[in-house]
Image: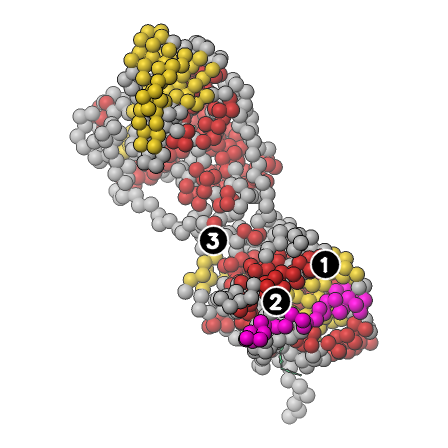
Amino acid sequence: MSSLTMGNRFGRNTTIQSSIDRPNTLTSGHRACQGCGEGLAARCAIDAAYTAAKGKIAVVNATGCLEVVSCSFPDNSWNVPWIHSLFGNTAAVASGVAAAFKNKGQTDVRVIAQGGDGGTTDIGMGCLSGMFDRNDDVLYICYDNQAYMNTGVQRSSATPALARTATTMPNSQYNGSDPETGKNVPDIAMAHGIPYVAVASVGNLHDLERKVAKAVNIRGAKYIQVHCPCPLGWGFPTAETIRIARLAVKSGMYPLFEAENGNLVGSTPIEEQVPVEEYLRVQKRFAHLFGKNALPENIGILQKIANNNIKKYRLGGMSDE
Amino acid sequence: MSKPFATVVESRTSLANKTGSWRTMRPEYVHRLPPCNVTCPAGENIQQWLSLAQEGKFFEAWQEIVKNNPFPATMGRVCYHTCEKVCNRGQYDGSVNINLIERSIGDMAIAKNWSFKKSDAQSDKKILVVGSGPSGLTAAYFLKQYGHSVDLFESHNYLGGMMRYGVPKYRLPRHVLDAEIKRIQDLGVNIVCNRKVNNLKDELSNYDAVYLAIGASIASSVSIDVESGATVMNAIDLFRKMEDDPKDFPNLGKSVVVYGGGNTAIDAARTALRLGTENVKIVYRRTVNHMPAHESEIQEALSEGVEILCLRTISAINGNKVILDKMDYDEENGVLSRSGENEMIVADSVIFAIGQSVDNSLVQGIEGITVTEKGLIDVDNCMMTGLKGVFAGGDVIPGKRTVTNAIGYGKKAARCIDAFLRGYEYVPGSKNEVANFKKLNTEYYKKDARKEISRLGDLNFEEKDVSYSDNEVVKEAMRCFSCGNCFHCDNCYSYCPDNAITKHEDGTLEINYDYCKGCGICASECPCGAIKMTT
Ligand SMILES: Cc1cc2nc3c(=O)[nH]c(=O)nc-3n(C[C@H](O)[C@H](O)[C@H](O)COP(=O)(O)OP(=O)(O)OC[C@H]3O[C@@H](n4cnc5c(N)ncnc54)[C@H](O)[C@@H]3O)c2cc1C
Ligand SMILES: Cc1ncc(C[n+]2csc(CCOP(=O)(O)OP(=O)(O)O)c2C)c(N)n1
Ligand code: SF4
Ligand code: SF4
Ligand code: SF4
Ligand code: SF4
Ligand SMILES: [Mg+2]
């Protein structure tokens, strides 16, 4: 029917995920929480990479939820060559794996590094920047659930402004994560001038699959960051994962775009921008922005961020003027 | 024994970890009732035939329609399509144009000469159907399919009841009606025209069961002082004359007043215009909002130039002068009263269209059969009168008077009669929960405006051809949300974070409860509400 669904009876514009013979690189029995956006995003991304590389992929995985839930001894949920690095050195390990395959002449094997936002934007930043700098032939995928989830929801440099985490508890002085802090790793990746940078969302699988497939077919360093709602860490009902991912995109809080060699080359337009409030209200990590004692200007801060994203990444839609 | 330098864990060993034990909520594939289906008086499975139409399977779609309604082309013209009023898409970007799709498919069937499948069912029972309106014909159609012998007696020379003697040609061309009736006849229904049943008693001994579908065709009257001068007639007689002596069109003069506010009044007014009358006024006692006529028909009449004078009653007709009493309406208490003011308008003819009642003389004096105060025949939940084996339905019993309802009654009566003849009582199957708008996730439906085609034609007795092309049928059918019934969008399968949904070769899906953690994403992201979470 409509091409907006993952599949359809007419075979028009269907996703790999909807196909009866999708690779299922991350299989059942993993221990991710109910409704985990990260586990789902990882299966979709690695399935897409697997399909694009005709099965010839090797995956290096940072410490974090994704690794812990998929390979707690004696279980393993992966159906591809997969190794667990340390928390901070994933990009470096992947660079090494890529070099090894190159030396063996196996240039058809595509190497993927993956990790959470903490492992990527904070502790793994040095190795990642090195991988970008050397333009190593690796696709690095960051599953951005916007905090250190596996150790109990601590703030990372990817945690959004004003979000509550275990280390940014709202109190009389603070309203959650300080809006003055944080870093934008897609921009940092673009500044390295690497061949391909993209931001995707688990709420848009057509787009996610396309970006992964495109990246797999490019030689050199690639970076994809995927928005992955975390029911546990953000505080929302497990059934809402996709809806929340969608709201992040539709509100402008999570701009979807792609860049080649440091230049923005495409973005997913927002047809009808929804107020950020709709996105925030459903998550407990923003509950303090709505209570009796909440300061109304806080929503404005986040709305401004969303509106700036729309301008900066050319998403169209309404602006705050 | 040499040990490996590192432990190698085999891939996919996590399959041993049955995470289904985490589950507190359980997803289940369900069928919910689409609101359109619930509301169709003939009980059509609209969602199902639209789904077939989406695939371009028009013949199969037609077969699905005629499972419940043997008159798709007729329905696509005269049905008041209550289905569209409740269509979930109406809350999104305009209801699906169900009626026009039905008409287009019905027309295809006529053009391609599709016929009904004859059933192999056998029975030695014989049933009499009295009346060839939609209700009688539909009952005969189903009874034939159940294998019974059916005699159908009709007092008129022509078949169709009010579909022919009520609904004017410009809304229902007779070749369409004839084609759909012939298909029923071809099933082997023994139809006898010009055969009025005067006393049911005379027939009872020849049949195992009887279905009375005699309609309501006596025009009601009011007492109004009429002095000679104007032509005064009732709408039912006008329509009958138009059908039976089509060459001898009645001359209504230049200006006509129609009295009444129902569909019959609207049809009489529009017919008068087509007969060459220059100005037609409908006089109705309440406000426009109260008119029982269908909204779209009122609109069509207005755009053809019919004038509607509301809050007036006719108190006297004197020559060409029609005296109107103006009425006051107290909106708050809903009370209608005479204002005391009068008004005079001029008319060459006055047509009364103030309702129809039943000629129930054929059941008078039959023990067991009772009638209401208004002369309608009493029936129980199984459509049976007080006399065992005698059933009644359509306009002749209390209820909504439309072709579609008459068809629904005909279908139900056939089921009840069949059950009766087999020695049990018909009990309708339990109904699924309704898939209302809240159960949908409309994110997955692209906005796409309803394709409207105005049915308003020229001021003559020809029908305007408004049917969709094949492509337009598919496109409009594609707008259907498939409320409450899986349309194989694969969202659930794609989004399940735990791979707990298996897709089979034929596209069907199955939940693997060994691994389903019960997150509920599948249910939330199912566009059409075909997954239910239970505790
Ligand atoms: C002008 C007009 C326009 C209408 N327009 C619409 C419309 O657009 N859409 C809609 O849904 N509904 C419309 N209706 C209503 C609709 O036509 C009726 O509700 C419907 O036809 C009733 O079907 P029925 O089978 O119960 O009775 P009928 O259609 O009235 O059929 C009864 C049949 O029984 C025959 N009969 C009666 N007594 C005997 C007897 N003793 N022996 C043998 N035969 C007998 C009659 O001759 C008649 O053929 C309209 C009605 C009128 C009057
Ligand atoms: C060097 C090092 N420091 C700390 C840890 C503990 N640790 C394991 S997972 C984790 C958090 C991971 O957060 P993130 O990378 O965002 O992934 P997520 O769990 O959120 O998916 C931490 C701090 C570690 N394993 N190694
Ligand atoms: S804590 Fe969040 S990211 Fe980690 S497994 Fe649970 S839902 Fe997934
Ligand atoms: S969208 Fe389709 S299934 Fe739903 S009410 Fe309308 S016609 Fe029926
Ligand atoms: S999405 Fe999967 S795990 Fe979640 S409830 Fe549905 S079948 Fe179960
Ligand atoms: S999500 Fe799609 S495939 Fe799954 S039950 Fe609903 S309609 Fe069917
Ligand atoms: Mg994280």
Answer yes or no: disc 2 within 8 Å of ligand 3: yes
* The residue stretch that appears in magenta: A169-197
- Relative vertical location of residue B229 with respect to residue A231 in this rendering, above or below: above
* Residue B122, magenta (yes or no): no
Q: Amino acid at mark 2?
A: Cys
Q: Is residue A37 visible?
A: no
Query: Quadrant location of residue B427?
Result: top left
Residue A313, labelled with which disc?
1
Q: Chain of mark 2?
A: A
User: How far from the left and from the top, in percent, is residue A205?
Assistant: 63, 59
Please name the predominant secondary structure of the magenta segment in the image: loop
Left or right of B469 on screen, residue A197: right
Q: Quadrant of the C terminus of chain A?
A: bottom right
Residue A228, labelled with which disc?
2
Provide the residue designation for mark 3: B439
Give the camera-side residue of A313 and B476. A313
Left or right of B281 on screen, residue A150: right
User: How far from the left and from the top, in percent, is residue A141?
Assistant: 69, 69
Mark 3 to mark 2: distance in Å?
Answer: 25 Å
Q: Residue at x 54, y 51 (%)?
A: B442
- The disc, 2 or 1, on the residue closer to the chain's N-terminal end is 2
User: Which label lies toward us, 2 or 1?
Assistant: 1
Please, what secondary structure does the residue beneath circle 3 have?
helix
Mark 1 to mark 3: distance in Å?
Answer: 35 Å
User: How far from the left and from the top, in percent, is residue B74?
Assistant: 46, 29
- Relative vertical location of residue B428 with respect to residue A29 in this rendering, above or below: above
- Considering every residue shown, the one lying at the far bottom of the view is B1
Answer yes or no: disc 3 within 8 Å of ligand 4: no
Q: Residue at x 21, y 31 (%)?
A: B370
- Relative vertical location of residue B343 with respect to residue A188 in this rendering, above or below: above
